[in-house]
Amino acid sequence: MMMDRLMALLALVVLTGFLGILVWKVPRVDLFVVVAITLSLAIWDFVANAWRRPRRR
């Protein structure tokens, strides 16, 4: 359970880093908007699923 959260956090950090480099190298407003929407959805998904109780099997 804890390892799943750490892996999800690591994936979120890597995604943020990649998109940050993309925005840094290609400074366009429309690209920034798309990256902001993408990161907000990824963060929302992480927060919504990281603290959800796992289902019993």
Image (spheres, rainbow, N blue to C red):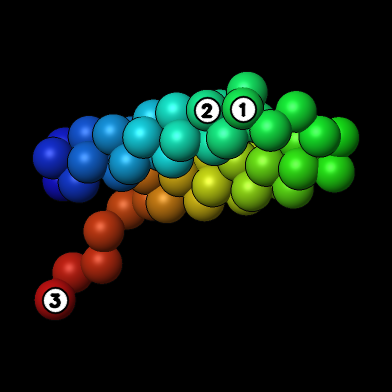
- Within 10 Å of disc 1 (Cα), the crowding (few <14, some 14-19, many 20+) is few
Residue, disc 1: 25
Q: Position of residue 40 (x, y in %)?
A: 65, 41
Q: Position of residue 29 (x, y in %)?
A: 86, 35
Q: Nearer the viewer, mark 2 or mark 3?
A: 2
Amino acid at circle 3: Arg
Q: Nearer the viewer, mark 3 or mark 1?
A: 1
In the figure, 55 relative to 13: above or below? below
Dot 3 falls on a residue whose secondary structure is loop
Q: Is residue 57 visible?
A: yes
Q: Which mark is residue 57?
A: 3
Residue, disc 2: 21
Quadrant showing the C terminus: bottom left
Q: Is residue 14 left or right of residue 28?
A: left
Distance of mark 2 from mark 1, alpha carbons?
6 Å
Q: How many marks?
A: 3
Circle 2/circle 1 CB separation < 8 Å: yes
Q: Is residue 16 visible?
A: no
Amino acid at circle 1: Lys
Q: Position of residue 7 (x, y in %)?
A: 22, 41
In the figure, 39 relative to 53: above or below? above
Dot 2 falls on a residue whose secondary structure is helix
> Of the residues under marks 2 and 3, which one precedes in the sequence?
2
Q: Which quadrant would residue 27 be assigned to in this image?
A: top right
Distance of mark 3 from mark 1, alpha carbons?
47 Å
- Within 10 Å of disc 2 (Cα), the crowding (few <14, some 14-19, many 20+) is few
Residue located at (16% from left, 37% from top): 2
Q: Nearer the viewer, residue 4 or 11?
A: 11
Q: Which mark is residue 45?
A: none
- Within 10 Å of disc 3 (Cα), the crowding (few <14, some 14-19, many 20+) is few
